[in-house]
């Protein structure tokens, strides 16, 4: 295929497209400073994201990352293994670029009155670049740089509503917690380097034997790496920024952070732990199976997220906690790894992140729509919206029931597969039974607060009179597309599941 | 002729179409749905007759076709099968063909009769009525030619539902809905066991087919021959258990003791519905099911003996209650219970032909009697109390003579049809009873019941038609039209001559080959080898005895039963065929109260429901409300409370977050470090 | 004995040294209390106002821009040193040697141009400019 004839570095094309779009936005703003031409800016962003999506899908179809034995083009390694482009890279890049495109389209209306238009879109693009780079990073250095590249624009994006105290406060908190977590992460990297003498992931795995004398040191380093990932994925105990940041940030940014950023956080966690720290070899050195940490984190995270979400009055905050809960579900993918496999569980977690990317983005975009209308923030304020905006509220119903895991929506299947694979993994790790039980209990609890929102929107009577609601075309389009994707994920689930399983198998194998 | 079988599904689908039409367009149709019903049942009748001819004249002589497989799986059966299929299929053999004709004929006549009984009387809700009749007929016909037990069960249930709808037709009265509910619940109680039986049979043999190589009957016979264990029982014991479970449904539907209590109450429905229920559909379904899977029961002497004994007991038990009833329909209701008791007795002693013969004759004369009583009710302006009638003989001759024919058949007076079939049942019971004491007891009860049958039948006839008119309406009755008379005449003729189908005693005496029904059911004219009378007869494990020679026994039995029937009739004649009859209840003394109260059957069943079931249900409800709901509510309260607490961790102060974050990290470090031995 | 005891000892010593020095100076020093000794040290000047004053944002802007170009220099310097050798080497052409650095500089230039155009280095504003971008 044509891909092979291209230079190797073009394998990073999705990330490069993001960078190019960001630079294009800077150029546009330089030519006409402080431009408020929303169509041009949002359009460029969306086109850039879709171009990245197109390239990614093309790579996938062309067989990049598919093992050569199966007729693919093989995994592409770049810069001496600092970056790697395999199926997992492409899978998560797809998630990131779709979410980015949706957020860009939705922001067209949401940020209509905002002063810093070009800054906003270029920051989104830079963050997306970071996330795409995270998906490809294959060395602790590139992992860290990519992670910071994704994080720093995010801080600014959360705080971009300069006149809104909540937004600014959220941005500061996000930044402070992020700085602390980055410090811990960086410390962890240094400890791992100290123990093994390498930063490149395969090289770390090859040199684990040499770290025998520094078992505790390596263990501490790994634990600190887990802390860094937990921060990026909003997992306990590094989750404290999430509710505040999601609530204070502009709603499209909340969608962006809770879907794309979280997915990117998981992809580096998946890659680092499958490539650099094979379970068996690592256990021999550090004396404990690191999946134990993920078992604990998964249970605590999903429980805390769901329990806290259950009693929220504020819709956005409820979604923030539900996002923490879903991080707990996805952590099962790491908790289920074992010496003789676990790719099924990890594949299931990847599937869940994929479907989650649509439904969660859609849910936050509905909040964006509600904020655009100015109806208020609590459940009561949403009462009876369906009478005035049935289409958007039907989409909301799809998102909520999919998040809760009601058949036949996509969220049900991904959660169902995750559950069965968790049970399957219990054969090698008995603790997975507890995880599976926690998954079921938490899913049941989550139905309570998700259906509460649907009930408010569809069944309850409005508290007071409301003016007619506008139908902003960008927001509506993004919500409807997200809803369609959530529904279409169902018939398309076979290919998605195959892609995820194959990607997981390649990553682990 | 064979090609005709392809149209078999239409037999049941015609009434279904009528049901749909009556439901959808009934209010706009001229006769509110009667015409489609008549056309449809007429069509079914013609097709059924064609089936009869096809069975008789065809090469194979039966039709067995699976139409639709709606579930198939690889569940393992107890006897080693590894797959099971649930299908809809049609089995038309001599038995089914005969029953199809009976059912569609009675349904057709009932539809015609309804033209006058319902339409002319200005009833409202007629579309609902005709829709119900259509669905009822459809369900019964489909049940009759079902080729497997599960399909039979489904339509058995549908029959029950239809009876519920039709008995409760006058739902604005207090009694009709209650009677409908009672019929539904009591038969449901029996069907519960039926369902368990179906599941047990399916789980044991991996098939629910009635006929063919892979039928559960053949599988059961093979299992008994193997002498293995099924679910920890002997094969034969297990067959008995499952057979008795299925019999639960039969006892409920065919109103056998102790589940007969719904049937008298079911008289709350329109009389035409009663005719349909008693003669051809609901009640007949139970006995037909026993006949349908007779090969299965034949494998188990215990099950057969229980069937026979329950039948004999019910025959006597119901007959005694019929003696003291005042309502003409009530008398007929108890006679139905009693007559179905005879059929069960006949089948129970292995008299397959006798049982089916009586089923057929009973269908004719009971339909006749009910329609006749319907005519009387029309005559009497909807008065049902016999003590308010009298002297109708001269004013309504057609009704009188046809009713009399039915009454003679019911009482079992030679040469009317009822005599021949009842006599054959009693003869079969007698020859088996000579070797089996239990069967002898059943026979004795059946024999005594003959006397009561003769008595209450003619008490009814005399009180209704003879003597002086006792009320003004009886002096000046309403007139009846052709739509009432024609069905009565058809049925009257059939009730009189249907006995010709199987003159077994005459055949034995003269040696003439005129027991046609026996040949028919024996596959002489076509049929499946395994489903024939002689095949059953070989399987039935009963010895047969005789008093002197076979002929002596037969004549003795026939004479005894005829004598008793006549004795009953003459007693009634002496007591009630007077110008002004009195009740003569004081002669019964204390027994009168017991009989009037139906042996307190309702009372104890109500006590079972209210005194036993209700407290248990209440206790279960309380358990559900407190323990289960409490646990559920508790979980949610704890969750919400926990959620509230968890929420408070998020204090909003970023230094707290940093502290908690580091604390959480250190906690994890300590646990993992301790487990991993990092600190040593 | 394991390493952690050594680390603990080191931490203990690290804590003891400053405490010890403070203790020694507390014991040795003469005690002459005076108010000006407690005043904030401002290079000998008399302190005015509180410490919590707002600095002009432009200081940070310049610092940031300086950082960027500082790093650019750090990267350019070693590149310039090996540039001739890379050109001479067989396996690298001029594209490989020059291309990445040009891309790097172009990215920086775009950023710089953007910063300039959006007023990052604009120290003073005319009344018209203030009028136009009142909230910036």
Image (spheres, rainbow, N blue to C red):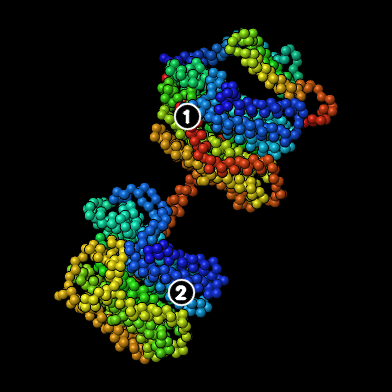
Q: State which quadrant residue B578 falls in.
A: bottom left
Q: Which residue is mark 1?
A: A70
Q: Which residue is mark 2?
A: B111
- Image quadrant in which the C terminus of chain A is located: top left
- Chain letter of the residue beneath label 2 in the structure image: B
Q: Is residue A492 above or below residue A335?
A: below
- The residues tagged by marks 1 and 2 sit, at their Cα atoms, a distance apart of 73 Å
Q: State which quadrant residue B30 falls in.
A: bottom right
Q: Residues within 10 Å of mark 2 (few under 14, many from 20)?
A: many
Please tell me which residue is depicted at 36% across the width and 74% down the height of the picture.
B363
Mark sitting on residue A19: none
Q: Residue furthest right?
A: C127
Q: Position of residue A37 (x, y in %)?
A: 75, 34
Q: Position of residue C84 (x, y in %)?
A: 64, 8
Q: Is residue B556 left or right of residue A188?
A: left
Q: Is residue A460 left or right of residue C2?
A: right
- Chain letter of the residue beneath label 1 in the structure image: A
Q: Is residue B424 left or right of residue A353?
A: left
Q: Position of residue B102 (x, y in %)?
A: 38, 71
Q: Nearer the viewer, residue A195 or B549?
A: B549
Q: Residues within 10 Å of mark 1 (few under 14, many from 20)?
A: few
- Give the SS element for disc 2: helix
Q: Is residue B139 above or below residue A196?
A: below
Q: Is residue B95 left or right of residue A359?
A: left
Please say whether residue B662 is visible from this viewpoint.
no
Q: Nearer the viewer, residue C26 or B240?
A: B240
Please say whether residue A455 is visible from this viewpoint.
yes
- Image quadrant in which the N terminus of chain A is located: top right
């Amino acid at each position: 295929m044509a891909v092979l004839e291209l230079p190797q570095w073009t394998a990073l094309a999705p990330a490069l497209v993001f960078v190019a779009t960001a630079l294009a936005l800077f150029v546009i703003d330089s030519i006409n400073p402080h431009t408020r031409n929303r169509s041009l800016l949002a359009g460029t962003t969306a086109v850039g994201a879709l171009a990245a999506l197109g390239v990614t899908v093309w790579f996938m179809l062309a067989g990049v990352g598919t093992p050569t034995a199966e007729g693919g083009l093989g995994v592409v390694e770049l810069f001496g293994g600092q970056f790697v482009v395999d199926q997992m890279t492409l899978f998560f890049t797809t998630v990131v670029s779709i979410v980015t495109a949706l957020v860009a389209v939705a922001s067209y209306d949401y940020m209509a009155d905002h002063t810093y238009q070009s800054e906003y879109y270029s920051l989104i693009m830079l963050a997306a670049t970071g996330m795409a780079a995270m998906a490809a990073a294959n060395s602790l250095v590139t992992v860290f740089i990519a992670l910071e590249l994704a994080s720093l624009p995010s801080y600014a994006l959360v705080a971009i509503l300069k006149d809104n105290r909540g937004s600014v406060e959220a941005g500061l908190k996000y930044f402070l917690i992020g700085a602390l977590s980055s410090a811990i992460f960086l410390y962890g990297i240094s400890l791992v380097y100290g123990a093994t003498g390498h930063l490149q992931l395969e090289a770390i795995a090859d040199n684990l034997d040499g770290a025998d004398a520094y078992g505790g040191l390596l263990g501490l380093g790994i634990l600190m790496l887990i802390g860094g990932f937990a921060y990026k994925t909003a997992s306990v105990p590094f989750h404290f920024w999430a509710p505040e940041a999601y609530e204070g940030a502009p709603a499209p940014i909340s969608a962006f952070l809770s879907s794309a950023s979280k997915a990117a956080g998981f992809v580096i966690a998946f890659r680092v732990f499958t490539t650099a720290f094979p379970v068996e070899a690592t256990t021999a050195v550090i004396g404990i199976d690191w999946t134990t940490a993920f078992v604990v984190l998964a249970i605590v995270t999903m429980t805390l997220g769901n329990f806290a979400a259950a009693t929220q009055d504020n819709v956005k905050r409820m979604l923030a906690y539900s996002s923490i809960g879903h991080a707990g579900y996805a952590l099962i993918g790491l908790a289920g790894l074992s010496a003789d496999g676990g790719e099924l569980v990890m594949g299931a977690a990847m599937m869940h992140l994929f479907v989650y990317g649509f439904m969660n983005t859609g849910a936050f975009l509905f909040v964006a729509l509600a904020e655009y209308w100015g109806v208020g923030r609590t459940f009561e304020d949403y009462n009876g919206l369906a009478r005035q905006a049935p289409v958007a509220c039907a989409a909301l119903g799809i998102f909520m029931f999919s998040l809760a895991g009601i058949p036949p929506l996509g969220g049900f299947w991904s959660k169902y597969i995750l559950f069965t694979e968790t049970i399957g993994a219990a054969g090698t790790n008995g603790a997975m039974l507890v995880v599976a039980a926690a998954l079921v209990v938490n899913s049941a609890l989550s139905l309570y607060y998700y259906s509460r929102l649907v009930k408010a929107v569809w069944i309850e009577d409005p508290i007071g009179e409301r003016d007619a609601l506008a139908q902003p075309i960008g927001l509506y389009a993004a919500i409807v597309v997200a809803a369609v994707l959530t529904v279409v994920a169902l018939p398309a689930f076979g290919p998605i599941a195959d892609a995820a399983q194959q990607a997981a198998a390649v990553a682990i194998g | 002729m064979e090609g005709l079988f392809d149209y078999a599904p239409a037999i049941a689908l015609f009434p279904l179409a009528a049901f749909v039409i009556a439901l959808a367009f009934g209010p706009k149709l001229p006769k509110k749905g009667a015409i489609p019903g008549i056309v449809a049942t007429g069509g079914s009748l013609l097709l059924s007759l064609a089936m009869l001819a096809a069975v008789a004249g065809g090469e194979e002589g039966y039709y067995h076709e699976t139409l639709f497989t709606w579930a198939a799986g690889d569940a393992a059966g107890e006897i080693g099968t590894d797959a099971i299929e649930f299908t809809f299929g049609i089995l038309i053999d001599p038995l089914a063909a005969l029953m199809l004709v009976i059912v569609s004929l009675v349904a057709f006549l009932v539809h015609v009769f309804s033209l006058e009984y319902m339409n002319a009387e200005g009833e409202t809700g007629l579309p609902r009525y005709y829709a119900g009749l259509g669905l009822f007929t459809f369900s019964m016909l489909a049940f009759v030619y079902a080729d497997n037990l599960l399909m039979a069960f489904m339509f058995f249930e549908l029959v029950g539902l239809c009876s519920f709808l039709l008995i409760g037709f006058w739902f604005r009265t207090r009694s009709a809905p209650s009677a409908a509910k009672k019929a539904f619940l009591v038969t449901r109680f029996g069907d519960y066991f039926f369902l368990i039986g179906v599941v047990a049979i399916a789980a044991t043999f991996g098939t629910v087919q009635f006929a063919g190589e892979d039928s559960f009957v053949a599988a059961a016979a093979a299992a008994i021959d193997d002498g293995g264990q099924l679910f920890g029982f002997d094969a034969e014991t297990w067959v008995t258990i499952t057979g008795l479970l299925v019999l639960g449904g039969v006892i409920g539907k065919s109103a056998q003791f102790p589940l007969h209590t719904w049937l008298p109450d079911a008289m709350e429905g329109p009389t035409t519905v009663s005719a349909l229920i008693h003669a051809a559909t609901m009640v007949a379904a139970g006995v037909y099911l026993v006949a349908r899977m007779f090969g299965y029961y034949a494998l188990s002497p215990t099950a057969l003996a229980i069937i026979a004994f329950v039948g004999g007991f019910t025959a006597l038990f119901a007959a005694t209650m019929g003696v003291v009833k005042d309502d003409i329909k009530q008398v007929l209701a108890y006679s139905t219970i009693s007559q179905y008791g005879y059929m069960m007795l006949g089948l129970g002693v292995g008299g397959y032909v006798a049982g089916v013969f009586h089923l057929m004759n009973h269908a004719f004369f009971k339909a006749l009697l009910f329609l006749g009583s319907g005519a009387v009710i029309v005559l009497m302006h909807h008065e049902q109390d016999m003590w308010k009638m009298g002297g109708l003989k001269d004013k309504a001759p057609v009704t009188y003579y046809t009713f009399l024919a039915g009454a003679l058949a019911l009482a079992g007076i030679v040469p009317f049809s009822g005599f021949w079939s009842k006599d054959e049942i009693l003869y079969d019971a007698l020859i088996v009873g000579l070797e089996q004491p239990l069967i002898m007891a059943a026979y004795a009860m059946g024999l005594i019941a003959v006397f009561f049958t003769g008595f209450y039948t003619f008490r009814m006839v005399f009180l209704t038609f003879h003597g002086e008119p006792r009320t003004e309406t009886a002096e000046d009755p309403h007139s009846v039209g052709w739509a009432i008379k024609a069905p009565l005449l058809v049925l009257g003729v059939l009730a009189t001559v249907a006995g010709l189908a199987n003159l077994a005693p005459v055949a034995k005496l003269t040696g003439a080959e005129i027991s046609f029904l026996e040949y028919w059911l024996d596959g002489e004219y076509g049929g499946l080898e395994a489903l024939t009378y002689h095949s059953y007869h070989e399987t039935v494990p009963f010895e047969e005895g005789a008093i002197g020679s076979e002929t002596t026994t037969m004549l003795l039995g026939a004479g005894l039963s005829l004598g008793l029937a006549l004795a009953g009739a003459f007693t009634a004649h002496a007591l009630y065929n007077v110008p002004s009859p009195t009740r003569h209840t004081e002669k019964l003394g204390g027994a009168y109260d017991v009989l009037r109260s139906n042996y307190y059957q309702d009372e104890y069943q109500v006590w079972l429901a209210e005194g036993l079931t209700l407290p248990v249900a209440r206790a279960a409800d309380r358990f559900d409300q407190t323990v289960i709901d409490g646990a559920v509510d508790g979980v949610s309260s704890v969750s919400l409370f926990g959620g509230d607490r968890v929420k408070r961790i998020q204090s909003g102060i970023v230094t707290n977050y940093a502290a908690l974050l580091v604390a959480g990290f250190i906690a994890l470090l300590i646990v993992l470090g301790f487990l991993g031995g990092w600190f040593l | 004995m394991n390493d952690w005891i050594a680390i603990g000892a080191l931490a203990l010593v690290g804590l003891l040294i400053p405490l010890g020095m403070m203790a020694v100076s507390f014991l040795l020093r003469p005690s002459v209390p005076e108010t000006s000794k407690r005043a904030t040290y401002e290079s000998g000047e008399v302190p005015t106002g509180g410490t919590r004053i707002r600095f002009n944002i432009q200081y940070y802007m310049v610092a940031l821009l300086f950082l960027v170009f500082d790093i650019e220099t750090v990267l350019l310097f070693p590149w310039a040193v090996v540039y001739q050798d890379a050109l001479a080497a067989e396996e690298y052409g001029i594209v490989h040697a020059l291309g990445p650095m040009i891309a790097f500089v172009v990215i920086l230039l775009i950023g710089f141009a953007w910063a300039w155009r959006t007023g990052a280095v604009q120290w003073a504003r005319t009344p018209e400019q203030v009028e136009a971008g009142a909230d910036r």
